[in-house]
Amino acid sequence: MFAISLGADGAELRPLEPWQAEEFLAHIDRGREFIGRHNGLPDVITDLASSRAYLTTYAKKAAADTGRIFGIRSGGELVGAILLRTMNVEQGIAEAGCWLEPSAAGKGLVTRAVRVVIDWAVEERGIHRVEWWVSSANAPSIAVARRLGMTKEGVLRDNYRYRGERHDMEIWSVLAPEWRAARKTP
Ligand SMILES: CC(C)(COP(=O)(O)OP(=O)(O)OC[C@H]1O[C@@H](n2cnc3c(N)ncnc32)[C@H](O)[C@@H]1OP(=O)(O)O)[C@@H](O)C(=O)NCCC(=O)NCCS
């Protein structure tokens, strides 16, 4: 199966498919508390059936060309994922997302992996605008958006109810010309 290198430390970006549901569940279990701080994913993936259902949703999105999921691996182990949660090729708009289990955080893996996926979306699929939706309380994810050169477009106040509390939701984005210009800058 193909793998894209994410740098000298042997980390890789690889496809993530429904047959890997057991491994995916084990990964979510390792990161459940950390990933769930601002993100409802761990509440969705609770057992093997829901893990397979989640990956099947993304397999169907890939078939319909409306989204993608890729796994981040370190030393062969699944430690995170990058999503194109939505992708509208006709409109040229996609929304990216990500997570890591705690052992893989703080190494730049997500920033490098999202760059690969945005490169693909922009250069191969003609996506013009890549969005990043993030809770205002999620400083590490906002830092990723900044590192990617995204622009904060606005705040949807109290838009996101999570674990009994309402949160502001920020929308960040990068446009294809901005992405290309930034990629040319050393
Ligand atoms: C959001 C999340 C993926 C960010 O993880 P992260 O490890 O901070 O992000 P990166 O992989 O890009 O790594 C950047 C960090 O690695 C450090 N780093 C080390 N080597 C690096 C390198 N070669 N290149 C870039 N950064 C590097 C950076 O300094 C930065 O650390 P800092 O924030 O302490 O300065 C992570 O916090 C997470 O999974 N959270 C839970 C799920 C979630 O909220 N997802 C987002 C929903 S919108």
Image (spheres, rainbow, N blue to C red):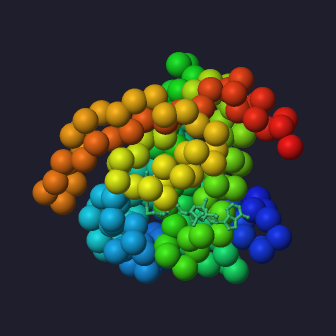
Judge by depth and name the residue closer to the eye, 170 or 119.
Answer: 170
Q: Position of residue 33 (x, y in %)?
A: 34, 74
Q: Position of residue 112 (x, y in %)?
A: 69, 56
Q: Using the image, determine if residue 109 lies above or below residue 96.
A: below
Judge by depth and name the residue closer to the eye, 57 or 84.
Answer: 84
On the rendered structure, is 178 left or right of 71? right
Ligand 1 image-quadrant field: bottom right
Q: Using the image, determine if residue 25 lies above or below residue 91.
A: below
Q: Position of residue 10 (x, y in %)?
A: 77, 74
- Image quarter in which the N terminus is found: bottom right
Residue farthest to the left, as pictured: 164
Residue farthest to the top, as pictured: 91
Judge by depth and name the residue closer to the eye, 108 or 129.
Answer: 108
Which residue is at 70% across, 32% downward?
179
On the rendered structure, is 37 left or right of 76? left
Q: How many marks?
A: 0
* Residue 20 visible in the current orientation: no
Which residue is at 72% across, 40% downward?
119
* Residue 76 visible in the current orientation: yes
- Image quarter in which the C terminus is found: top right
Which residue is at 36% across, 47% downward?
136
On the rendered structure, is 44 left or right of 99? left
Which residue is at 83% across, 37% downward?
185
Q: Using the image, determine if residue 29 lies above or below residue 106.
A: below
Q: Tell me which corner region of the image, top left, top right, bottom left or bottom right, holds residue 34.
A: bottom left
Q: Position of residue 37 (x, y in %)?
A: 33, 65
Q: Tell me which corner region of the image, top left, top right, bottom left or bottom right, holds residue 105.
A: bottom right
